Image (cartoon, coloured by chain):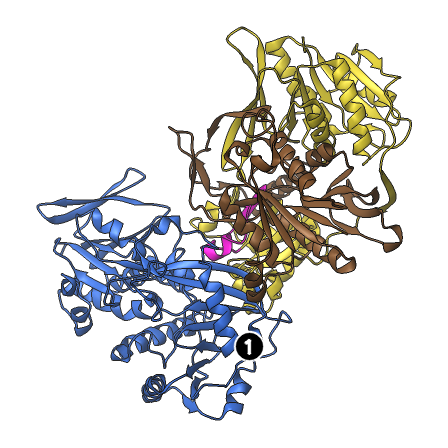
Chain colours: A blue, B brown, C yellow
Amino acid sequence: MAKKKIGIIGGGISGTALGYHLSLYDGEAEVIVFEKDTIGGASTAKSAGTVCLFDDSLKNRYWDVRLYGFESYLKMEEEEKGSAGFDKTGTLVVATNEEVEKVIKTGIALAKAAGYTGEYITDKDRIKEILPDISTENILGAGYTADDGYFDGTMISNTYAKKFQKNGGVVKTGVKVTEVVVENHKVKGLKTDDGAEYEFDVVVDCTGPWSKFTGEMVGLDVPIWHTKAEAFFLCPPGKKLNYTFPVLKYPEFYGLRAGDNIFICKSHLSMDLSNPMHAGQWDPDKLPATGGTDDYFIDFLLDQLEAKVPGIVDSGLVSSWLSYRAEPKDFWPILGETPVEGYMLSTGYGGNGVIEAPAATRDLAKLIMRGESTPLLENWAFKRLL
Amino acid sequence: MNIAVLIKQVPVSNDVSVDPETHALVRASSEGMINPADLNAIEEAMVLKEQTEGKVVVFTMGPPDAEKALRDAMALGCDEACLITDRTLAGGDTVATARVLAAAIKKYGQFDLLLGGALSADGATGQVGAMVAECLDIPHIVEAMGVKYDRAGADRIVAVKKFHDKKLSIRCALPAMISFNFGCNEPRLATLRTKRAAKSKPLVTYTNAELMLPLDQVGIAGSPTTVVDSFSPKMGRKARMLEGTPAELARKLRDLIEEEKGK
Amino acid sequence: MANGICVYAESYKGKLEPVAAELVSAAKEIQKTTGERVQAIVLAEHAEGIAAELERLGVEEIYAVNAGRDCSQQDDAVSQAVTEMLRRIAPSSVLIPATPEGRSIFSRAAMKLGCGMTADCTEVLAGTKEDGSYYIKQNKPSYGENVFVTIITRDGFYPQMMTVRPGVYTAQEAAEGGQAKIVYFDDIKVGDSKIEVIEEAVAEAETGSILSAEVVVVGGRGVLEDDNFGLLEKFAEKVGGAIGGTRPMVDSEMIPFNHQIGQTGLTIRPKICISFGVSGAIQHTEGIKDTKLFVAVNTDEDAAIYGAADYGIAADLKDVLTEYLAL
């Protein structure tokens, strides 16, 4: 039986996870991943990699997706320590109002059901024990688990890529796709900037913030917006913390440790899409590796930290970066078939790529290889946006 | 001690290439930052400020958005800033640039010490510091590792400099110009508070209306040297792979290292 | 008419610096086209020995000033004397080593003469103008070697002054029987200087700060196995380098966080960087910039690091390190 030929554009978390899942259909597929730069080097590299079992950045409606991602990476770590870059710092999710408190408690219930620990702490002294630099004024309590932490999206992408290659997959780095060949409204293959041409039955767009441009190659309007993920690296006063900084989540921002430094990022859901400072359609190729944050972010962060984590507000600013979270207006990913036959999407993960990619690409691989859909694919289908 | 620090705003990334047709520079991003060696100069200035009284004024010549570099410098502790910006002053070579900086310093006020980074990350000429010193008729020490100041000898400063395999202590009368090598100290970091405070520190802008330099002395018109061609070397900076047994490879590696060290 | 290709004969403690021989070579290349005399200027405490060395290199005209004292670092006074020499010699071009001394002295001279100076040329070529006269095309890298530019000194500005990168031109070989016109400017003095060297000590080996290290050895995942880190440490000692590492090395506590290189750690700018077992995922290569020599050792031929390095060695780092230490 002829092997199915699949071309994947983009070697970030989405593309490498998809390549891996496809390679599990032993001998049935010929898959090539095309990455114009380095594996997991673009949006994925700027991802915080947090899981946050009690959080609502990925609504609890999709708890199973979050859990699947978490457990996939734990298994990766079991196979080879460090291959997912797991730093098990524990996570503290702060409840600043009753609505948030409810979500956290739901998260704890779900986490416990899956066999993980979790508790909702109202004893402010205990909260301060976990994170001495926090201010417990104006908070109702906090959810805490020691089982959680953060991963490294770039390491994970490289691990997926290696496993994919071991299963016969081909990875081409430093190669840019310049044209997707379409005949009679059906994808035939693609061309790359080194002059090569490939034949494919299916081409999948895993290019995240570039998806609009990638879609133009087949005349498809992919309704991706970019929201800004602004982040700072802080060097704590005294240069070193004498405690393990947990993943820290507030509705407005989140933080985690990065070596001896602290990484702080503005949260997703506090973005105002109608504010051109927060959301727009930009060119990800013009994003610098470091710097690029807007001025207002300094004031924002100063006010937030002064009120909430005053112990670190006088940290040194080591560096900053800006990344684009790519997603459609309803904030859900876009997966699967499009009006162009053979052209599929695995994009719009909007800052949750690391946690969503394993489940999403597992299902997408099944769709590609068997034509079988799943409730997840149906919820996140492209046609909902038409 | 009144100190002037000269800084340059350089691209965050040296990831630039030349458009083969227009010969224009193609930048991956327009993001700018303070030249890394200048951060070392600012750090030296801050230490001196802590030891003496007086103020630190930071200068830069550039497009209007170079104000960002000045605000970043003030977030590190510089007290005042001077932005020199004017189309007619732009595009100059090191000579034309040095004339402008010297004029701005002269206009701004009296300084005991001028500090700067030894080389910039983009142009890397290492010339402007000494040229500014020449324009102001003051002595200079470039590519230093640090300075020491002694209240007892208030009109002098001692710079430490590596030269050949020696470490020299060099005494210099003030006023003087001193430039520092990248990495010679650990620059302090700005904080959120100092960044906010920097927004309201005094910043003065000079155009040529204030400096009144003759047009044949500044900018492109005032540059004795000019760029007539530019190109990017072959794309894709792929490493040249070395071949051989581990012993041969080790020898080749040693030769490469020794050769580079000798340069 | 300005005439002559003049080389600055940089010397140290009475001996001609090797780079001067390279510049003589470059001058002789230009001479093939323009037919000008190859000249040299010497300014030293005792210039005689240096002048003799220059004569053996085939320099045709040597202009010297005996400073009568060690005027090293006194570039305010030295530049004054050198400028006066150049005014008298009136060469059409001046080739200066792109060294701290060359830059320091001649930046001032270039400003005094208003002639400008091009920095760090990797190639100097004679070009011919429409009217048949000659000029020098000064080729040099910019933006950390990503862009190469050709610079010229505009009409009416003399001399054409440029610093030339050491190690690019092959040194002219010395030969006996050279005949040079040697001129001593007895009336040009190195005047008083506001600068004084008060102490000269032996420079200690670089310790501590990885940021100021000229040589950095970076270890990645591959170093975590066996006693590879021990080998890396010995290698670093042998080449006189500081040790940096990517995140896995810090996570396993082999190196402290303040030696972590990469997007979440430090950005280093050493002259020489040798990496072992570093794959080159972006958060690592973003931490190494503007190196003059970058060699990566990684068994994976397709490792991304080879996109950033100048040379690659696709071999087992343990073997390479063991062999290197045996050298």
In the rendered view, would you say A52 is above or below C55? Answer: below
On the rendered structure, is A89 left or right of C49?
left
Query: What amino acid type is highlighted by mark number 1?
Result: Pro
The extreme left residue here reads A184
The residue lying toward the viewer, choosing from C93 and B96, is B96
Residue at horizontal 66%, vertical 55%? C242
Q: Position of residue A101 (x, y in %)?
A: 36, 87
Q: Residue furthest bottom?
A: A123
Asked if one can make out residue C120 in the rendered structure from this viewpoint, the answer is no
Q: Quadrant of the N terminus of chain C?
A: top right
The residue singled out by tag 1 in the image is A310
Q: Position of residue C146 (x, y in %)?
A: 49, 38
Q: Who's the residue at 68% across and 11% down the image?
A: C2
Q: Which of the 4 image quarters holds residue C7?
A: top right
Please state if A115 lies on the left or on the right of B178 as rendered. left
The local secondary structure at tag 1 comes to: helix
Identified at 85% across, 32% down, the residue is: C71
Task: Indicate whether residue C282 is drawn in magenta.
Answer: yes
Q: Nearer the viewer, residue A303 or A374?
A: A303
> Percent position (x, y) of residue A229?
39, 63
Quadrant of residue B190 within the rendered picture: bottom right
Please state the extent of the stretch shown in magenta in the rendering: C277-298
Which chain's residue wears label 1? A
| Image-quadrant location for residue C294 | top right
Residue C81 lies, with reference to residue C240, above or below; the image says: above
Q: Is residue B153 left or right of residue A30?
A: right
